[in-house]
Amino acid sequence: MAPIARLSVFVAVCLVLLVADLRFRYLEVMRNALSVVTYPLQMAAATPADFVRNASRYFATLVEVQLENADLRRQRLTSGERLLRFELLEQENAQLRELLGMSRRVGVESIAADILYNAPDPFARKVILDRGAQQGVEAGLAVVDAKGVVGQVTRVHPVQSEVTLLTDRNQSIPVSVVRNGVRGVLFGTGRGRLEMRFVLADADIREGDQLVTSGLDGIFVPGLPVAQVTGVDRVSDAFARIDCEPLAAIETSVQVLVIGRTAYPPPPAPDPKER
């Protein structure tokens, strides 16, 4: 049979099948059977494309989530830094207000200074201030914070000065008890504590008593808060052993006042009865 004839026969058969399927649905069963047979092949062919599409969507979502998390972390860090700076400013302002209150309470000329660092001396309790001779600081001046006495200027440079802390073992300061005026001398122990000496064993001193500067040395202004009595030991017949803790935040203070020398009172006049 000629090719044209064969083509004509195939076309005629296709037309007959098409018309018959449209009108009588003769090929429905065959189509269903073929779809069942070819479904695994279709799924197998579509699986790589679905995998690639789903993987792309997953990684895109993962990258988006990571970017969002990084942005949230940055925002949280920024907020935390701002909050920390705000809290530090609040603390500094509170300390400055307390220091201003101490300056008014002392009622004398004073120099505001910041503690820069601890002096590099393992055998002494000293700090370095950011004020020196150019700002009017002199050796021997008293140094206080908002709570009480911190120490005494012992060395002066042009723009810095060295302060020996109250707790240094070589530091001493005359004090008196607020409650009854009993006097003694407070010494540093070198261990962050203080000891009041030269007090008679039968003196009226008890735990909790507040100690202030007596001013008898002509260096510290009278009435500055110094320490609180934490223990009284009357083991000796002559003198009592009195342990104290400083009222000033000696280990943590940053802002301090250097009390000017011009405000110091003159030494007390001798008692005529003692002559």
Image (spheres, rainbow, N blue to C red):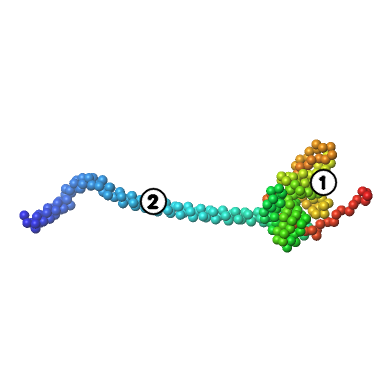
The residue nearer to you, when weighing 152 against 208, is: 152
Occupied quadrant, residue 3: bottom left
| Residue 150 in sight in this render | no
What residue is shown with label 1? 184
Q: Position of residue 51 (x, y in %)?
A: 33, 49
> Foreground: 42 or 252?
252
Q: Secondary structure at mark 2?
A: helix
Local packing at callout 1 (Cα closer than 10 Å; few below 14, some 14-19, many 20+) is some
Mark 2 = which residue?
58
The amino acid on which the numbered mark 1 sits, given as a three-letter code, is: Gly
Q: Quadrant of the N terminus?
A: bottom left
Quarter location, residue 159: bottom right
* Residue 219: % across, % down: 80, 54
Q: Residue at x 58, y 56 (%)?
A: 82
Q: In the current view of this chain or complex, which residue is farthest to the bottom?
A: 134
User: Identity of the amino acid at label 2?
Assistant: Tyr
Provide residue 246's location: percent of width, then percent of height.
74, 47
Determine contact: label 1, label 2, CB under 8 Å. Answer: no
Q: Is residue 57 visible?
A: yes
Would you call the spot at circle 2 few (<14 residues within 10 Å), some (14-19), or many (20 or more)?
A: few
Q: Nearer the viewer, mark 1 or mark 2?
A: 1
> Viewed as shown, does residue 80 lie left or right of 140?
left
Q: Nearer the viewer, residue 239 or 107?
A: 239
* Mark 1 residue element: strand
Identify the residue at horizontal 81%, vertical 42% (top origin).
Answer: 205
User: Number of numbered discs present?
Assistant: 2
Q: Is residue 46 left or right of residue 19?
A: right
Residue 107 x %, y %: 78, 57
Q: Residue at x 14, y 53 (%)?
A: 14
Left or right of residue 9, residue 257 in this image = right
Which residue corresponds to the image point at 81% horizontal and 40% vertical from the top-left? 240
